[in-house]
Image: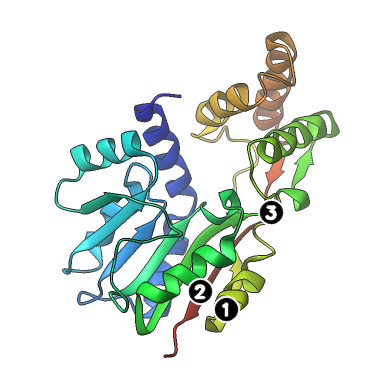
Amino acid sequence: MDNLEWHARFTVQAGWTQELRHYLYNQVGLNEKSRVLEVGCGTGVITSELKQYTKTLVSGIDIEFDRLAVAKKLDPATHYDCADVYHLPFFKDTFDFVTAHYLFLWLKEPAQAMAEVLRVLKPGGGLIALAEPDYLARIDSPQQLWTLGEMQTKALIQQGANPMAGRLLPTHFSQAGFSDIQYGISGYQVKSDEIPDWFDSEWKTLENDLAHQASPQKLEVLRKIDLGAYQNGSRVRWVPTFYAYGKKNY
């Protein structure tokens, strides 16, 4: 996918957790004086909305320069850097909060990345992991679509993702040195006989991810089954998505 397509995809993912983000920002005490950094900010979809919560400079970092170019074009008021989460280009005790959204599942050493986040947080500041999925606990129905979930999980593993990232969040927070850790699972409620507005976006991603596992013909068959299941109200697709936050106490 090109970078504008990635921006559209990130926008869809941000929509899934919009209410949860608002809840968590209030829960941790993010306010107009908070200095905030998003790590793994992509095209800046979530970073840019932080201006609704704080009047202080907001920052975002990502290792993909081309995605950052989109972020800078769409949101020139925010400070974006091309940087590695394992080596953040900021002084110790710089930020009140650091956020991440669908990031840690892609990292080989998430606890190490969190330890670097801990370094740049002010004492009393916190890391908020907004969304990390657990693909090994995925639920699909009807049964004809079990194979679709299995193929997607396999494709993500092949791309380097950790399918158990969600359930491991509290462990990684603790290993990194955070305290007062809390975690939960994002709420999930849908209208059963309604095609979700992200259906086409999801299938564009699936076709890209599964190109080496299934023929276009097989994918088209699965897409029709998927669409039909949404239309007749029998479709269930749930990937438990965890969130967590923790504080720096020193």
Report whether 200 appears left or right of 49: right
In the rendered image, the vertical position of residue 189 relative to residue 149, given as above or below: below
Q: Is residue 186 visible?
A: no
Q: Earlier in the sequence, mark 2 or mark 1?
A: 1
Q: Which of the labelled discs sits on residue 144, or is there none?
A: none
What distance separates the C-alpha of mark 2 from that of mark 1?
Answer: 6 Å
Residue 223: x %, y % from top left: 67, 21
Assess whether mark 3 and mark 2 are in contact (beta carbons under 8 angstroms).
no
Q: Which amino acid does label 2 sit on?
A: Tyr
Q: Quick one: 143 or 99, which is closer to the camera?
A: 99
Residue 158: x %, y % from top left: 69, 35
Local packing at callout 1 (Cα closer than 10 Å; few below 14, some 14-19, many 20+) is some
Q: Quick one: 50 or 121, which is closer to the camera?
A: 121
Report whether 188 appears left or right of 46: right
Q: Mark 2 points at which residue?
A: 245
The part of the image, by quadrant, that contains residue 181 is bottom right
Q: Earlier in the sequence, mark 1 or mark 3?
A: 3
Residue occupying the far right of the picture? 143
Q: Quick one: 219 or 64, which is closer to the camera?
A: 64
Q: Quick one: 61 or 8, which is closer to the camera?
A: 61
What distance separates the C-alpha of mark 1 from that of mark 3?
Answer: 17 Å
Q: Which amino acid does label 1 sit on?
A: Gln
Report whether 40 appears left or right of 153: left
In the rendered image, the vertical position of residue 130 relative to residue 28, given as above or below: above
Residue for point 72% across, 9% down: 217
Residue 13: x %, y % from top left: 47, 44
Assess whether mark 1 and mark 2 are in contact (beta carbons under 8 angstroms).
yes
Q: Which of the labelled discs sits on residue 182, or is there none?
A: 1
Q: Which of the labelled discs sits on residue 134, or is there none?
A: 3
Instruction: Assign a secondary structure to mark 2.
Output: strand
